[in-house]
Image (spheres, grey):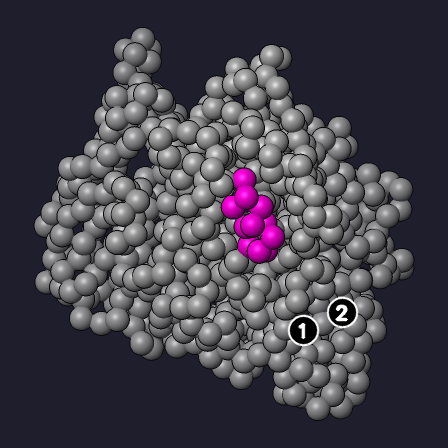
Amino acid sequence: MRFLLYSLDKSYLIKFQMKKSRFLVLLGSLIVGANVLEQGSIDTETRMLKKARKIISQMTVEEKISQMMNEAPGIERLGIKPYDWWSEGLHGVARNGCATVFPVPIGIAATFDPNLIEQVGDVIATEGRAKYNVARQIGNYGRYAGLTYWSPNVNIFRDPRWGRGQETYGEDPYLTAEIGKAYVRGLQGNDPFFLKAAACAKHYAVHSGPEALRHEFNASPSKRDLFETYLPAFEALVKEAKVEAVMGAYNRVYGESASGSFFLLTDILRKKWGFKGHVVSDCGAVDDIYGGHKIAKDVAEASAIALKSGLNLNCGGSFHALKEALERKLITEVDLDNALMPLMMTRLKLGNLTDDDESPYKNISDSVIASYTHAMVAREVAQKSMVLLKNNNHTLPLKKDVKTIFVAGPYAADTYVMMGNYYGVSPRSNTFLQGIAAKVSGGTSINYKIGILPTTPNMNPADWTVGEVRAAEVAIVVIGLSGIDEGEEGDAIASSHRGDKQNLKLPEHQLKFLRDISRNRWNKLVTVITGGSPIDLEEVSELSDAVIMAWYPGQEGGMALGDLLFGDVSFSGRMPVTFPINSDWLPAFEDYNMQGRTYKYMTDNIMYPFGYGLTYGDVSYSDVKILNPKYDGKQEIHVQATLRNNGNNEVEEVVQLYLSAPGAGVITPISSLIGFKRVTLESHLSQTVEFIIKPDQLKMVMEDGSKNLLKGKYTIIVSGAAPCKRSKELGVGESKIDFEIW
């Protein structure tokens, strides 16, 4: 049973003099109401379970199999409508026409703002539902027009060369889980039974490149890494957010195909975590069981392995062979019925199985699609996603009445770079150039030239741009990567490594352009970097007065940058992934051991740490303390710290809570993020921030994957970034306290 009690302030209590008896009556009413809602949900679910069983019992074997593939045909005699399960929504309704386009997921994670991201999920579901309602009216039952969104991607961004890292929420399991849960809650809605849209946690599990090997690769991480790094976000989305679907990955895990692994799909997902939804394969992954991994001798055997392991839905056509598998007695019809049941329940929750649609969301109109209100949410996300990495001598914010500005670079006026991958089409996308131009005074002289091509050197040796950039009071140069440089294996057409990166360097001709501009200059140089993954920014930082990581910021990215550059909004984004100095010192891309990876196990080769980001303030940390110091390992720990904004501007600070267990006696992370908060700090004022640490957060993962509370010394750090030597060099504030568990 779940219900909410809203606190009443003292003035309200004084005014109304609420007596204890009346309060108890109110409380009783709330409980009764909650019980009624819960009972209604149970009754609806019971009724729908009966309906699903009845429908399945009326199907032929061929019809059952047809409903277990993504392109499920209609069954007219049963009133079942056609449905394609494949829809995308990583950062907006994707590949399905007009929609609000948000920053890519790595940018979404950079907000460190779950409340905002829950709004994002709701916007996507609202637009998706509206588009679905209209699509049904015109008879569009095709791909991407459905309500089962194969999002979010909660894989861990363990290697910066992975091209699909832009689809993730970064390198940290806790941040990934918190952002992922918020997205799922927003997307699926708050009805006790019906779904606004269905979310899908992918790619389960241990998937993060290389793209070229994904159809044949066997990932064999230690059990410690599996349960400490690769699985926690999936577990959180299943157990806490009640995600409706899980997608199996292409790769093997411990020799089993992830889309046909009894260990992953049955032992862990269903038995250990209690997952009740459906499991879908990545597209073509069942084919890989025999074609890539050589586990099965043919498609019928591969399909049988996947089905009996716990797969419900096949993206692709392999499950056509289930008829043959049945004839060869590799499976039974009961296996088909059991696998089909969660699929029918998902469609009933969505209200798209039969004509008697009971969904409370069926009347959402298309007036909400790409609305101004939704655009403003996208703008706020873009504002909070961009990370200020350098701001030498208070270069930023710029004055709006600056005399001359020159904007240059291949992505300054480019709309494609705003999208990343898996995107929709916005009717109001704006570029960085437009966002800058919208902010300056009418008397400011602002000019633009592209200067250089995005991926190849200029063919013309004469380029007037460099001299013109040098002549301006402020130069703003936009360089970096785009969706053609990094992404999924078939989408990133400029990548020589199937969407992955060979190293972390920017194209040499882009760096040369920046060097030429910077040589003997007198003006301010602001460099804006686009990309969805870590980039070697050592030289960029040396050459520039200010450096901004803008990611692929979505349709409102241009206006958001303008807001930030000119001080209408203060920078508050934080790095969701460590930016190494270069890739030469990284472990091998194919190595899934976490040692030497992410802030948890990196001691050097760090340019910009996880959690790092500047504001227009100057925040100091002090006086961290434990309010209940006598800890026995069973109760919550209450932690307080004092923050002070020593700057002249109001800012939003992302306060981060880390735990370190150097005295625990086993291999443990250097530190682990266990909490974070966005806090508004007024100029020259202090504020106390409080965190609550749950007992389970103190447990360490052992070699066998189990979690234990270890005796020994622990350290709690409240900080503005992951605690490390590089954070100190960058002037990141922190305050810490030790305690022991005996």
Residue nearest the viewer, comparing 398 with 539: 539
State left or right for residue 630 relative to residue 659: left
In this rendering, the answer to whether 371 lies above or below 183 is above
The answer to whether residue 306 of the structure is visible from this angle is no
Q: Amino acid under label 2?
A: Gly
- Residue annotated with mark 1: 285
Crowd band around label 2 with a 10 angstrom C-alpha radius: few (<14), some (14–19), many (20+) = some
Please state the total of marks drawn on the protein image. Answer: 2
305 sits to left or right of 388:
right
Quick one: quadrant of the N terminus?
top left
For the magenta stretch, what is the residue range? 506-517
Three-letter code for the amino acid on which mark 1 is drawn: Ala
Q: Is residue 251 above or below residue 672?
A: below
Whether residue 224 appears in magenta in the rendering, the answer is: no
Q: In the displayed structure, would residue 300 be above or below residue 211?
A: below
Q: Are marks 1 and 2 in contact (CB under 8 Å)?
A: yes
Residue drawn at x 43%, y 45% as measured from the top left = 541
Image location of residue 710, percent across then percent down: 19, 66
Going 58% across and 40% down the picture, which residue do you hit? 478
Q: Position of residue 168 (x, y in %)?
A: 53, 55
Residue matched to label 2: 316
Task: State the residue lying farthest toward the top.
Answer: 15
Cα separation, mark 1 vs mark 2, equals: 8 Å
Can you see residue 367? yes
Give the percent coordinates (x, y) of residue 76. 89, 58
Q: Quadrant of the C terminus?
A: bottom left
Q: Mark 1 vs mark 2: which is more N-terminal?
A: 1
Secondary structure category for the residue under label 2: loop
The quadrant holding residue 340 is: bottom right
